[in-house]
Amino acid sequence: MHARTLRRVSTENSCILYPRPQNPLLCASMSSASTKSQAKLARQTVTTWIDKFERSKQTPHGLPEDVLRHALEGYGAESLTWPSLRSKAQDFNRYVTSHVTDCTIHRVLRRPIGRKEPGASVSIYRLMAKPLRQAETLFGANTYTFTFWCSGLWFLSTTDPLFTTDHFHQRLVERAIRRHESLAEAQDSLSILWPMLLELGEQRRKQGRRANVTNFISPLADGLIFGEMQKLVMNTEMTELAAPELIDFQNGLALTHRLFDFFCNGDKRLLILVRTFVGSDKLKDTQRRLKEALDRYVRRHSVVIECLRNRSRLAFDADAPYGPVHHDLFVVPQPSATDYQRALAELDAITSSDDWRSEIDRSIENRSRRHKEP
């Protein structure tokens, strides 16, 4: 039986077992005990996941030591044919599925179409974790993309700007109706709306308006997530480590390219911090209306959202040929300029609404109050 059902059954049974008198203090006490029990179970679940994650990590980056050797097998003096290229990508996809844990994998295959060169790519969103003070854990992710061409291989690595803590994942396990069994899948699913909000902020600045997207709300499963955008000051070494890098393997040579970091400005890099999740049974009226509006928005503009979601992960802004070719390979169908403008205009209206502003103000106030607590 699902945890949410258990909680409701527990509350209902308390009224059946104690019909006289219906003491509100007693019912509240039992409800509080049930909530604490759910929170404890969620903490234990996430702690177990973290322990399993740490035990499964064989290398700092989470990939097998021989992953590049495996990816380059079969390349030689002769270019691969399309059947050989397709088979190679499928074999590599099976290899990483078996050998890389705590990840999500996205594969694309493009057969020869007109003048377009056939290509295939396997992109791995790999969860990363770093211990914090007071036994907390900070979760981030790297994306490793292996793009196979008939004449060679591109290996791209990028660093995701989105981070969470174990507290967030505990709230997700505790409050979401749908059962979550993977830290990596949960982390990956968070990058739905914030890339669109970032683009909206840039458009507002160009129009002479305030960006006003520092604090944000986004739909997830049956509820809403609350987060904020920050600027993280980094030293030179950290900036270089976070920058996207592409290695181009062609004709027996390996050329390394440091690519444009979309999220970096001098010594500051954008950090997206998702703080908490509110499930459907806890949503207030304004939050419920926002949830419905945002769900409709995501369904209506899914092509634009997916394109911006992959923009930094797959380095669409990199110089030619890498950025444009990756964009052409992964983005099908490709949204038009009109599609972008419609999506941004609708998001502008949602984030200018009274419901959005009141919930953002409430979120800031709650965070400020918690910071003041001893």
Image: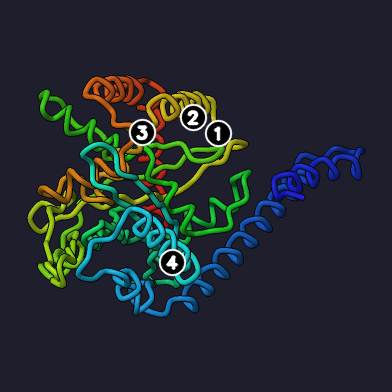
Chain-order first, disc 2 or disc 1: 1
Residue at 45% from the left image edge and 42% from the top image edge: 225
Chain-order first, disc 2 or disc 4: 4
Distance Cα–Cα, label 3 vs label 1: 16 Å
- In front: label 2 or label 3: 2
Chain-order first, disc 3 or disc 1: 1
Distance Cα–Cα, label 3 vs label 4: 44 Å
Specify the quadrant that holds the C terminus: bottom left
Q: Which mark is residue 96?
A: 4
Check disc 3 and report the residue beneath it: 361
Q: Residues within 10 Å of mark 2 (few under 14, many from 20)?
A: many
Disc 4 on helix, strand or loop? helix
Q: Quadrant of residue 136?
A: bottom left
Q: Amino acid at mark 4?
A: Val
Distance Cα–Cα, label 2 vs label 1: 9 Å
Q: Tell me if I can see residue 300 in this picture.
A: yes
Circles 2, 1 touching at the beta carbon (< 8 Å): yes
Q: Which mark is residue 221?
A: none
Chain-order first, disc 3 or disc 4: 4
- In front: label 3 or label 4: 4
Disc 3 on helix, strand or loop? helix
Circles 3, 4 touching at the beta carbon (< 8 Å): no
- In front: label 2 or label 4: 4
Q: Position of residue 146 (x, y in %)?
A: 30, 60
Circles 2, 3 touching at the beta carbon (< 8 Å): no
Q: Amino acid at mark 1?
A: Leu
Of residues 361 and 250, the one drawn nearer to the viewer in this rendering: 250
Q: Amino acid at mark 2?
A: Lys
Check disc 1 and report the residue beneath it: 283
